[in-house]
Structures are given as C-alpha cells and as structure tokens.
Image (spheres, rainbow, N blue to C red):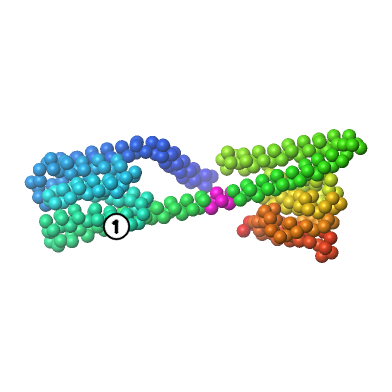
Amino acid sequence: MTTETTTAPSRYAQQLMTRIRAFDARHPWVWDTAVTASWTTAALVDAAGGWRTTAQDQSVPVWLVVTATLTLSVPLYWRRRHPMTALAVMACGAMAGDASGAFLQSGYLQALPLFHIALNRPPRALLCSLALLAPPLVAGALRFPQESWEQRLVPALWAYALVALLGITVRSRRDERAHEVRLAATAERARIAREMHDIIGHNLSVITGLADGGRYAAARNPERAAQALDAIGTTSRQALAELRRLLGVLHEDAETATRAPQPTLTDLAPLIEGVRKAGLPVEAALPSTAPALSAGAQLTVYRVLQEALTNTLKHAGPDATATVRLSCTSDTLELLVTDTGTPSPTPSQGQGQGITGMRERTARYDGTLESGPLPTGDGWRVRLRLPLEDSPS
C-alpha cells in the first residue's frame, strides 16, 4: 500500500510532463508566446521606473529604456529555433542599456538563448556567444566604473557560464537517453529478427517436408496426400498466428504486449508431433511434469528444440531420425537433441543466425549450449543446460 501511494503521484507527474512535451512539440508557438509575453511584461514594468534602482545614470531617456527593454525581451520568441540570432539582437539592447548607464536588469534575459545555444548548437557556438555577451558588459564597466571595474563584468560572466554549464549538462543527459533508446531499439530489432527466424524457418521447413511427402503420396495414396495438405494448412495457420502475435507487440504498449502467450514446455509435444508429420521420425522422452522455469527460460527451451529439429529437417538428409531427451536434476534442466543424418557443414561454418540465436537465448538465462557433430561422425548433437533457479544475468 505504501509503495502504491508513493509511486502514484510520481507516475502521474511523469504522464503530465509527457503530455506537456508532446503538446509543445505539436504547438511550439504556444509556449514561446507565453514565455515571451510574460518576460516582456515584466521588463516593461521594470522600464516604468524600477530600472533606476540599478542605473548609473538615471537621466537616460525613457524611450531609450523602453526600446532597449523590448529589444531584450521580444527576441525570446525565437530563442529555440534561432538562438544565435536572438542573442545577437538582444546584445544590441544590452549595449544600449550598459553604454547609456541604464544597466537594465532585463539584460540577464540573454541567459535564455544562451541556454539553448549550449543545449542544441556545437560547442564553438559558445565562443560566438561570449563575443556577443562581453562587449556590453565591458562598455558599461569602462564608462561607468564602480569601486572596481570587474564588479560589473565578473558576476555577469559567472552567471552566463553557469547557464551554459546547465545547458551542456542537460544536453549530455539527453544524448545519454537517446543512446540508451538506440541500444534498446537495436536489441529489440535483434530479438524480433531472432523470433522471426525461428518461426518462419521452422514452419517453412515443416511445410516443405509435408509438401514433398504429399507429392509422393498423391499417386499411391490420395488419403495420405489429403492429410499432408491438412497438416500444411494447420502449420501455416500456426505460423501466421505466431507472426501476428510477434508483430502485434510493435503496435501495442508493453503492458498489453506481455499478455500475449508464448510457447512453454507444454508445447514441446505438439512441436515434435508437427515435425513427425513433416516426415522426420522423432523419438522423444519428455518429463510428465514441467520443471520450475520462468516463462522466458521455457521459451528458450522451446526455441532451441525448434531450431535443432529444423536444422535436422534441412541438413540431415532424407533418411535421418532424431531423438529428443528432456531431463532434470535437482538444479539443472538438460535438453539433448541428436540425429542420425550426415552432418552438414552449413550449421558449423558460419554459425548462422539460428545457432547464434540459440547461444544468445541460453546466455540470457545463465545456461550453456553445445552444438556439433557426434563423436561417431554420423550425426549432430545439440545439448542445452539451464539452471532451474532462473536468474537472468
């Protein structure tokens, strides 16, 4: 109850900020107009007489003060799209204020476009900004010296430097988040490619085996040919359903996507039966009760078996047979898949995407995978070991 109470306001604040950013991205002029109008109003109020509290020369004409004030505030409307241009125009107003002795407090509004320059422009743009910010300060300090000439110059430059550092910090964090998003997108593309390889590769291999068997049976046993066609239709529909589920994740939010069922250990028997229908004799020994594994680890076992049987269908030859053994000890699950076909160089030379995908899945759950020819040289073996206490690394 305490966790829900503390996280609900934070979640609401994040959602509110996301909506505000989205609205600002669609209608940037609204925020720009509001900021410009508020600071212009404040600057004009100061121009009505408050500027004299900091002025070195209180006899400056009011029209000059108002003109310089508007020059310092109105360009804020373009501070995000054209920050350097806005700062250049504002520097003219600052020069008028400092050189005349008005020392307008609105001169500090130059910090706003400076922030956006540090946020979005190359680092060398900050040197150009310094060339715009320093001359008015130097002119005011030289023409109206106080106890020490740097009293006017140094505090202002420190303030601008802090604003620039703030912009650089925000920019660095934004770039880090963008980099994390790119890495996550790359990992997601790799995951989807791996899943599609497993789904399409396996089901097409099964369909090919069924089609070949149906073609040979058509002349001798039409009933067997019809059964093969039925199996092709079933396999095709299963493949389409898996692809729709996989690609549907791209159009759903994470909460909805996690509800889509994924293959588990209970689906191993139907997987093996589908391979048998495709023409590959498979001897299977599966435990009567499923061991304790997370959903992701169960999907790993399913995909490894699927890939191993697919490779047997594709590479082991027409007379091959396969054996599947799934066993458990007190702390380890072991899946052993062997076949009696002639080993093909295809799986071992390039370690193609299928075997690479099996290794990546296995490593994700702290397991080990061995894939290679049998010691006798007349078959292939895939051995998967996963810890029963799933602790992803």
Q: Report the residue marked by disc 1.
A: 127
- Which quadrant does the N terminus fall into? top right
Q: Position of residue 26 (x, y in %)?
A: 41, 37
Q: Secondary structure at mark 1?
A: helix
Residue drawn at 58 percent across, 51 percent down? 187
Mark yes or no: residue 186 visible.
yes
Type of amino acid at the residue the image marks with label 1: Leu
Q: Position of residue 186 (x, y in %)?
A: 56, 51
- Which quadrant does the C terminus fall into? bottom right
Of residues 4 and 276, the one nearer the viewer is: 276
Q: Is residue 195 above or below residue 339?
A: above
In the picture as drawn, the residue positioned furthest to the right comes out as 220
**Residue 34 counted in the magenta span:** no
In the picture as drawn, the residue positioned furthest to the left comes out as 59
Quick check: 234 left or right of 40? right
Quick check: 87 left or right of 63? right
Of residues 274 and 316, the one nearer the viewer is: 316
Crowding at mark 1 (Cα within 10 Å: few <14, some 14-19, many 20+)? few
Of residues 302 and 206, the one nearer the viewer is: 206
